[in-house]
Amino acid sequence: MSTVRVVLGDWSSLQQDAQAVRYQVFVVEQNIPAELEWDVMDAQCLHAVAYNEQQQAVGTGRLLPDGHIGRMAVLASARNLGVGAEILRELMSQARRRGDAEVRLNAQHTAERFYLREGFVREGDSFEEAGIPHVSMKHTL
């Protein structure tokens, strides 16, 4: 497991690093159109960025005001090292701290097992988002 430091902040303070990770993962790797990746919610979210020992941004995620977690992304070079779990746990901790009863997310099918391991449960049928199969999941805090 790698040693990462997760930094929390608003979009204005973390945009450059969060955007770089999201661009690489979603736009470059997954071919999601860039115009679908950025939205007005970024300015309203709590963001998390994970930095490796060389202080490079390697992962990110965001917590929306309504308790949804989204835009979870980890660079390919840092996957399967616990980076995503650290980001997710930190966002869940922040949701719990502010009084949210649960958190929800839309998981890509390829990430469903990851979220199940973190205590999330699947809800409902699969659906497509940005041309990628997803499933709704929730975790009671």
Image: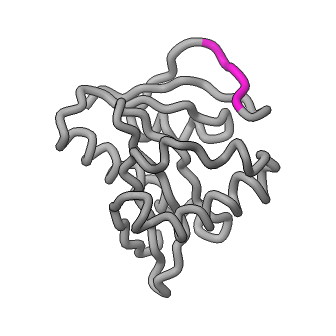
Q: How is the image coloured?
A: one colour
- Residue 31 on image: x %, y %: 82, 49
In this view, 14 is above or below 92: below
How many numbered marks, from 0 up? 0
| Magenta-drawn segment | 125-129
Nearest the camera: 70 or 113? 70
In this view, 121 is above or below 28: above
In the image, farthest residue toward the bottom: 54
Residue at image location 56% in from the left, 12% down from the top:
124
Predominant secondary structure, magenta span: strand
Nearest the camera: 4 or 45? 45
Nearest the camera: 89 or 17? 17
Is residue 121 rendered to the left or right of residue 90? Answer: right
Q: Is residue 131 magenta?
A: no
Residue at image location 73% in from the left, 25% down from the top:
128
Q: Quadrant of the C terminus?
A: top left
Residue at image location 54% in from the left, 23% down from the top:
136
Q: Which of the 4 quarters of the picture holds residue 12?
A: bottom left
Is residue 136 rendered to the left or right of residue 28? Answer: left
Q: Is residue 128 magenta?
A: yes
In the image, farthest residue toward the top: 124
Residue at image location 55% in from the left, 31% down from the top:
106
- Residue 8 on image: x %, y %: 33, 61
Q: Which of the 4 quarters of the picture holds residue 67?
A: top left
Nearest the camera: 43 or 109? 43
- Residue 68 on image: x %, y %: 42, 33
- Residue 17 on image: x %, y %: 53, 70
